[in-house]
Image (cartoon, rainbow, N blue to C red):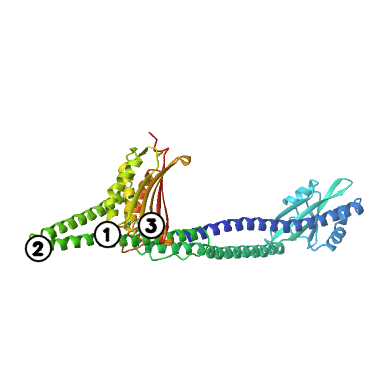
Amino acid sequence: MSIQKRLVGSYVAVICITVLILEIFLIVYVRYYYLHNVERSLMNQAELSASFYEQYFADADLEEQAERLLKGFAHNSDAQVQIINASGRLLQDSIGLPQGDLTMTNYLDVRTALQGHAGAWRGKDPSTQESILAVSFPLRSHDVIVGEVRFVTSLTDTITTVKHIAVVLISVGLLVIAIVTILGLLLSWTITRSIKDLKQAADRMTEGDFSIRVHKRYEDELGSLADTLNMMASRITKSEQLKNDFISSVSHELRTPLTSIKGWMITLKTSGSDNKQLLHEGLDIIESEGDRLNHLLEELLDFSKLDNGRIVIQPAPVHLAQLLHHVGKQLSPRAARQAVSLEVQTADNLPVLHADENRLKQVLINLIDNSLKYTESSGRILLQAHAAPEQDQVVITVEDTGIGIAEEDLQYVLQKFYKADQHATGSGLGLSIANQIIKLHHGELRIMSEAGKGTTVQIHLPVKNLTIS
Ligand SMILES: Nc1ncnc2c1ncn2[C@@H]1O[C@H](COP(=O)(O)OP(=O)(O)O)[C@@H](O)[C@H]1O
Ligand SMILES: [Mg+2]
């Protein structure tokens, strides 16, 4: 069953039950009120007649005075008036005495009045089958019941009035139910409309169309669901874009060294055997291009392992100063080739870290590689480490005087595959890998940079977690 049907169904059910209960109560009450009023007015007349009799006729014989009495009683009333003696026989009737049996004791009100109480009875007139109401009141003479006066009226008019009122009440009830149903339909439509939009969009997304956006109709839960769905779609689109960029950049990165290797192979095949110097030069280049390919593949492998959480750091005591100098020495030939000065400064008070030395080295090489890549000749690179005991940290800094990173790129450079310059060599994975490795060490990687001035990358490593030995 659809949500709309359920919503409208429950509204209507609640209203129907409420209206039904209210209607039953009102109709019963109205009927009671009208009938009771008629009865009370008859009873008043009967009581008045009885007290009149008691006052003025108590000493007279009832049977003799019955006709006079009847005239007096009937004079002030539209109802049929009867006078009955103490044994329950009808003496006088304002519409004329019927033929045959005049005994009235089979009527409840008559019997009640003969016992000394006011009696009332509602039922059908035996001859006309009309609904009637009869009220009897005892007539007393010096505290002895000598007979009774009986007022009878037709209830047809009253019942018709009650029926009319009931029809009006039921119509109003039906109107209320109709209005509520329409309102319910409208209200549930506003809800189901949003749900339908969401479902449609989700269906399209399932089919792979992530360009679709859900139109947000209201600022409610469904509205925020629409926002979430839209956000999800744009994230997926973006990661799709990143994947494509990545594939094209990796293919590009693979092609450049491969083209160079292939070119040199052909050159060497034709003239390598004659020219020793050319052979050496070619083999060198092939070797370094091979290294470049290897490096790229390693980066990719690392990245996928980090992404799957399959890289575990293996902590061991690390002498930071030694590590830094070692890395500096390893990269100084390349720095010298580029005419960039590479300087290593280490404070004396460096604690011995408990960390994964190889991973840390990988991070440092990555950072210095970036600095070398983006620093022009006669630039300066400073690799430095100092302890910050007040924060229980060691801070390793790689600072360069290179081209820097523009402000709008700075927030993205830690993301995988992000390169400020799409055409620069590299996969865009280096900083992302470095960042994750530092995170695995419970540390933090911070990048500060200004375009044209240079870049500073800081690695903050906690000492407490890494235990000083
Ligand atoms: N020292 C730096 N100077 C200038 N730009 C840098 C530096 N380090 C990183 N970047 C920018 O950050 C991007 C991402 O770096 P990285 O993740 O190491 O990828 P890759 O080195 O493969 O390009 C680089 O493409 C570059 O635009
Ligand atoms: Mg890099």
In this rendered view, identify the residue nearer to me: 73 or 243.
Answer: 243
Number of marks in the rendered image: 3
Q: Which mark is residue 271?
A: 2
| Quadrant of image for the C terminus | top left
Residue 310 visible from this viewpoint: no
The type of residue carrying mark 1 is Val
Separation of disc 3 and disc 1 at Cα? 28 Å
Label 3 residue SS: loop
Q: Nearer the viewer, mark 2 or mark 3?
A: 3
Mark 1 Cβ and ligand 1 under 8 Å apart: no
Q: Residues within 10 Å of mark 3 (few under 14, many from 20)?
A: many
Q: Residues within 10 Å of mark 1 (few under 14, many from 20)?
A: some
Mark 3 / mark 1, whichever is N-terminal? 1
Q: Residues within 10 Å of mark 2 (few under 14, many from 20)?
A: few
Direction left: furthest residue: 274
Q: Identify the image quadrant of residue 201.
A: bottom left
Residue 409 visible from this viewpoint: yes
Badge 1 is on which residue? 250
Q: Nearer the viewer, mark 3 or mark 1?
A: 3
Label 1 residue SS: helix
Image coords of residue 465 (percent x, y): 41, 38
Q: Which mark is residue 401?
A: 3
Q: Nearer the viewer, mark 1 or mark 2?
A: 2
In this rendered view, identify the residue nearer to me: 309 or 447.
Answer: 447
Separation of disc 1 and disc 2 at Cα? 32 Å
Direction top: furthest residue: 469
